Image: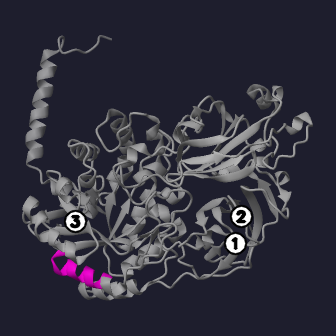
Amino acid sequence: MSTWSFRRRPGRTLGLLLLVLLSFLVLRRLDWSTLIPPWLRHQRLGLQAKNQNFMLEDTTFWIFGGSIHYFRVPREYWRDRLLKMKACGLNTLTTYVPWNLHEPERGRFDFSGNLDLEAFILLAAEIGLWVILRPGPYICAEIDLGGLPSWLLQDPSMKLRTTYKGFTEAVDLYFDHLMSRVVPLQYKHGGPIIAVQLENEYGSYNRDPVYMPYIKKALEDRGIIELLLTSDNKDGLQKGVVHGVLATINLQSQQELQLLTTFLLSVQGNQPKMVMEYWTGWFDSWGSPHNILDSSEVLETVSAIVNAGSSINLYMFHGGTNFGFINGAMHFNYDAVLTEAGDYTAKYGKLRDFFGSRSGAPLPPPPDLLPKMAYEPMAPSFYLSLWDALKYMGKPIKSEKPINMENLPVNDGNGQAFGYILYETTIASSGVLHGHVRDRGQVFVNTVSIGFLDYKTTKIVIPLIQVCYPRELGVASPSCLCGGLVGYHEEDLEDSGLLNHKGYTMLRILVENRGRVNYGNNIDDQRKGLIGNLYLNNSPLKNFRIYSLDMKKSFFQRFTTDKWSTLPEAPTFPAFFLGVLSVVPSPSDTFLKLEGWEKGVLFVNGQNLGRYWNVGPQETLYLPGVWLNPGDNQVIIFEETMAGPVVQSTDIPHLGRNQYIH
């Protein structure tokens, strides 16, 4: 059969062109609205900015919003929190999308379980809430690196939040995947998403004048067709405006309201005003007092904002919990409208009355509170020192120089994102040790702790050390700083030359990543671990063995039952402690309190509840009842320096990880 071609069939080509032209003329006369399914016809115009009002279709619309982050709330409690938002008189949910959690390794995406963004948005629609999506890629959100994945920092020249090629290539791939999920959920496609925010508070960063136009085009090219917004605080508002995008502001006090009537009007004329983030509370830091914003002050400011003709979003309505290690570096605790466990506050009652008076219809009744319970104290029964645990972790990474956490050859080349990292090398003399430790490094000579290195303490004296001999050589040593070469394979001894030496001293530094900065100009410098060389008496140390202690679920699978020992009278630290929390047939939420413990991390049934530290202000860890099993529940504690006798359970939080606790 001959192949059809234009050259051989010119008459057929002309006929085809005439058919296309005739079809175009006929279709022009059609009423396209008759082709739209009935369930979509009423969602054609979307949210619009017309003069001083928002319009949803042909109706004036006030945005009364509240922020809840799905990734900070157990999925089983999403409905409870959203129903409480609806019952408070709010009509719009706002949420960030954390890139670092959704793409933990380059090209591997996770939208399952607690990260099921689509399910969260559809649930909001079912409850009767509209959605403003804030997809970033940078979100701040008091989350590690502002939501940017740590593997971006493997590039030594990385310039985050700019049009640097290495960054935009990663953003493009992420947006390709994310927007394929988001686009069908937009208002004009029948979904609840009425607006999408470009990045977050870029005016305060402002490193690249073409970056925000790039983000705008990236969203539009991938099918975002709803109203676009920017969001900036008073320091960045002037530099955060993008052509064709509605600017909104973030604030906490009435004094800042003047920005609504001055700057916004001057740059975008008679447009709707919106406070994208009215800060309903403020943040706590480790070792500082707990911050509380008075409920009467909150009501007064919210009233003033709305009376000034502005829409509003409460940030946060419910903050949830930074479970695990996802916290950012500067902020720790948040005093919001709902508590961490979803309980009502005085703010909730006053705001419900206020928004109810403006709703035009009775509000649904607030859902009942979820029950809380105090269980019997848990006393750990088993123990495993970190030094004994090393031998179950396989061979360490060997490197002539220290390697920072992000560049460790682990996780299929994506480095380590969170947790701890242990560096070991041998030294032959005492002296002054110094280097850049990010963020906090506990220094050991053999197994004896001699102090800490961090941002403030950059030098530490290594004491005069008596010669020590490996236990494998069968030579006793009287030195108090000799702990033996615990956790090493014989081939490691041979490789390091220790078996050929008369003695050795093992230098160990356990470095904790306490969270990458989530806001500010230094996000490009947030690599963790040992950064650069480590010096003893100004000479760089070499030949390191490095352990990745990410403390993910797979990390603990190494510690089978036979690896644990009964709890000794005088444990060696750092160490893991294992116990059982006994729970009634119907588990309820509780709060775990670690009196007598100093600093560490707590895991229940493999779930990382987060860090604890006796410097406060946080004194309890929130444990959702949905993560408990009737009967026995495994509890593992990693303690750095000092263990208490029990872990207590209480039904009342003590400054209780009450929003954004890190």
Question: What is the spatial separation of the Cα atoms under label 1 and label 3, in whole angstroms?
Answer: 61 Å
Asked which secondary structure carries label 2, the reply is: loop
Answer yes or no: is residue 549 visible: no
Going from the N terminus, do you reach mark 2 or mark 3 first?
Answer: 3
Question: What is the spatial separation of the Cα atoms under label 2 and label 1, in whole angstroms?
Answer: 8 Å
User: Is 141 on the left-hand or right-hand side of 425?
Assistant: left
Quadrant in the rendering for residue 654: bottom right
Q: Are marks 2 and 1 in contact (CB under 8 Å)?
A: yes
Residue carrying label 2? 642
Q: Which residue is depicted at the point 61% across and 60% down? A: 608
Residue carrying label 3? 42
| Residue nearer the viewer, 15 or 633 | 633
Quadrant in the rendering for residue 652: bottom right
Residue carrying label 1? 596
Q: Which residue is depicted at the point 13% across and 64% down? A: 264
| Residue nearer the viewer, 224 or 273 | 273
Decide whether residue 539 is among the magenta residues: no
